[in-house]
């Protein structure tokens, strides 16, 4: 069974590609988290976790959900992490998570996908994004083949830079940057409520027909990148930047 968390569609695209290759069904972690659903899940022996990389590790909301959820009958777990650059030493923490859940760790695969974190970086225009996605095809197929054949993923790079980014920078990044205070809606907002429905943490509500953000946020970028009117900004950091959604 494939479990996927996705903000702007990169990880969902990868999960669908893997599913088409392996035949595994897909479960939406976003909706599970949104509904506060941590009930035990009856699944096959194989668990495949597909998520973005947040500050060189699994998104904290995903690792927290995994820790709280029992995967009945599961024995082995593969992790597929999409990223705009690198996953750091995320495999170490995925392995520890498997130990907590009594799952056999089968490795972590890195899939390079278009950047979407416009609170800090720039997203590519769609033509460039499409090329990045196409180049990812061989890595996705390799990961899917390993899962189907029941073998471990190749061990990824693990140098001192990777270890520092995942161990020291990750918690600092969360405490310093993962905040919702800078989000706001411009006058072009239509009050459609899509941002409210997409937020996995129920952190957005409509007030006077405009979105208002609470204090819980994971910076998934769903609200800002998927706004039909492109009416949401993140302070001055997102102004003039392309909004990215995986449209394949």
Image (tube, rainbow, N blue to C red):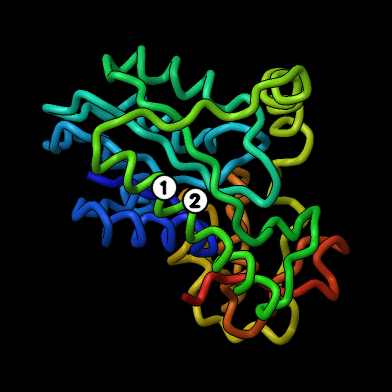
For residue 193, the mark is none
| Number of marks in the rendered image | 2
Residue 129 quadrant: bottom right
Relative vertical location of residue 174 with respect to residue 116 in this rendering, above or below: above
Residue 183 quadrant: bottom right
What residue does disc 1 label? 142
What residue does disc 2 label? 139
Dot 2: what SS? Answer: helix
In the current view of this chain or complex, which residue is farthest to the right?
A: 236
Quarter placement of the N terminus: top left
Residue 213 quadrant: bottom right
- Residue found 44% across the figure and 19% down from its top: 95
- Residue found 50% across the figure and 76% down from its top: 247
Q: Local crowd at mark 2 within 10 Å, few (<14), some, or many (≥20)?
A: some
Q: Do the residues labelled 2 and 1 touch (CB within 8 Å)?
A: yes
Where does residue 182 sit, x and y in percent of width and height? 77, 56
Image check: 108 left or right of 84?
A: left
As measured in the structure, the alpha-carbon distance from the residue carrying label 2 to the one carrying label 1 is 5 Å
Image check: 143 left or right of 132?
A: left
Q: Local crowd at mark 1 within 10 Å, few (<14), some, or many (≥20)?
A: some
- Residue found 54% across the figure and 42% down from its top: 110
Relative vertical location of residue 248 with respect to residue 118 in this rendering, above or below: below
Relative vertical location of residue 97 with respect to residue 215 in this rendering, above or below: above
Where does residue 81 sit, x and y in percent of width and height? 51, 42
Image check: 150 left or right of 220?
A: left
Where does residue 45 sit, x and y in percent of width and height? 15, 31
Image check: 156 left or right of 170?
A: left
Where does residue 195 sit, x and y in percent of width and height? 53, 68
Camera-nearest residue between 184 and 89? 89
Dot 1: what SS? Answer: helix
Relative vertical location of residue 104 with respect to residue 135 in this rendering, above or below: above
- Residue found 78% across the figure and 23% down from its top: 161
């Amino acid at each position: 069974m494939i479990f996927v968390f996705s903000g702007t569609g990169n990880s969902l695209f990868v999960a669908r590609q893997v599913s088409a290759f392996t035949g595994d069904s897909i479960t939406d972690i976003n909706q599970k988290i949104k509904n506060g659903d941590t009930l035990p899940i009856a699944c096959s022996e194989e668990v495949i976790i597909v998520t973005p990389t947040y500050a060189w590790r699994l998104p904290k909301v995903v690792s927290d959900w995994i820790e709280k959820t029992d995967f009945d009958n599961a024995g082995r777990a593969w992790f597929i992490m999409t990223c705009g650059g690198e996953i750091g030493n995320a495999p170490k923490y995925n392995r520890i998570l498997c130990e907590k859940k009594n799952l056999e760790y089968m490795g972590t695969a890195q899939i390079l996908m278009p950047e979407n974190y416009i609170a800090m970086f720039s997203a590519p225009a769609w033509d460039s994004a499409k090329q990045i996605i196409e180049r990812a095809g061989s890595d996705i197929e390799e990961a899917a083949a390993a899962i189907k054949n029941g073998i471990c993923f190749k061990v990824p790079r693990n140098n001192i830079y990777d270890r520092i980014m995942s161990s020291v920078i990750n918690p600092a990044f969360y405490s310093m940057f993962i905040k919702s205070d800078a989000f706001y809606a411009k006058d072009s907002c239509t009050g459609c409520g899509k941002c409210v429905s997409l937020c996995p943490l129920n952190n957005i509500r409509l007030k006077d027909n405009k979105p208002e953000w609470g204090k819980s946020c994971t910076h998934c970028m769903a609200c800002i990148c998927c706004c039909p009117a492109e009416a949401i900004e993140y302070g001055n950091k997102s102004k003039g930047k392309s909004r990215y959604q995986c449209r394949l």
